[in-house]
Amino acid sequence: MTLTASYERCRMLNAKHGRSYYLATLLLPAWKRRHVHALYGFARYADEIVDSFDMTSDRGAALEALAGRLAAALDGAPVDDPVLPAFAHTVRSFGVDPADVMAFMESMRADLSVTRYATYEDLLGYMEGSAAVIGTMMLPVLEALPGAAARAREPARQLGLAFQLTNFLRDVGEDLARGRVYLPMEDLEKFGVEVDDLGAASAGQAVRDLVAFEAGRARDHYRQALAGVDLLVPSSRPCIRASYDLYGGILDEIEGAGHDVLAARARVPRRRRLAIFARHLAAASAAGRDERRVTVPVP
């Protein structure tokens, strides 16, 4: 697996499994895209080990094998793996914090044994590794303004949490089919929801009220993330604004369906996704041109 082929595999994973986010990445300068794809591709690759309905081998052994190859790749050793060469190259190139990578792997391990979360604080502990660190790993690639990296870190975390909680709400039925409930058990009790209610053909009023409550939490994470967009260099802002609109659009669809996330999977219609992309395209093109302009004499 050449480095070029590894980056291409990551791009394909992003295009196949993260259509909304992939669309948003097209607003980035071309040189940044492959690194964003590498980070997404690695996360998706690990996630498939713990989540795939098709995998029949020992998931724990497969995940630990990946962890071993990951350690070797981060140390600079060649590895026989489709995505790790690109991921390790991006981590080293941008100084991605290895602690974030390890936190992500710990959350993947949790998915093999933890199927319920008692409180929202417990769920946040899981999402710290599964989502918040994805935001902070992306930050060096997206580039904060000079002197703004520290201030941009928390909004990046919050955006990761917002995206993850949005996915949890959209995928309640799918997650239950895997034996997992990501909505906090204390919230189910508060709204009078039984676990079996989450597997119904359509959501009753109690489930709808529960989903509306959790959607409010997701909106709060989005609000906390918004200030971070202007802390990024201009050429990265259209991508993040489009991602914000696209994932927020999933919440809009959930709300438009009366918070019934069981009858059908919430999706942002293709026409709306393309309209969001088009709305941010001019800003992306202008910012890219401005940043390519040479402002110092070439010797």
Image (tube, grey):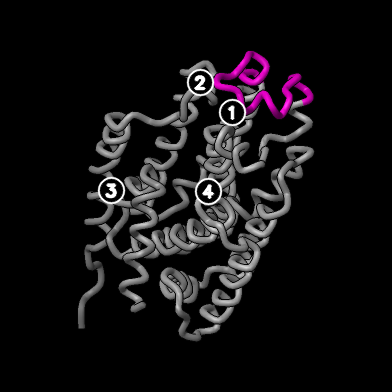
What residue is pinned by disc 4? 53
Dot 3: within a 10 Å radius of its alpha carbon, few (fewer than 14), some, or many (20 or more) residues?
many
Residue range corresponding to the magenta coloring = 189-209
What residue is pinned by disc 3? 284
- Mark 4 residue element: loop
Residue depicted at x 73% and y 41%:
116
User: In the image shown, does 56 or 71 lie closer to the viewer?
Assistant: 56
Residue depicted at x 30% and y 32%:
270
**Mark 2 residue type:** Glu
**Mark 1 residue type:** Ala
- Mark 3 residue element: helix
What residue is pinned by disc 1? 215
Judged by its main secondary structure, the magenta piece is helix
**Distance in Å between CA atoms under marks 2 and 3:** 30 Å
Specify whether residue 224 is in view.
no
Q: Nearer the viewer, mark 4 or mark 2?
A: 4
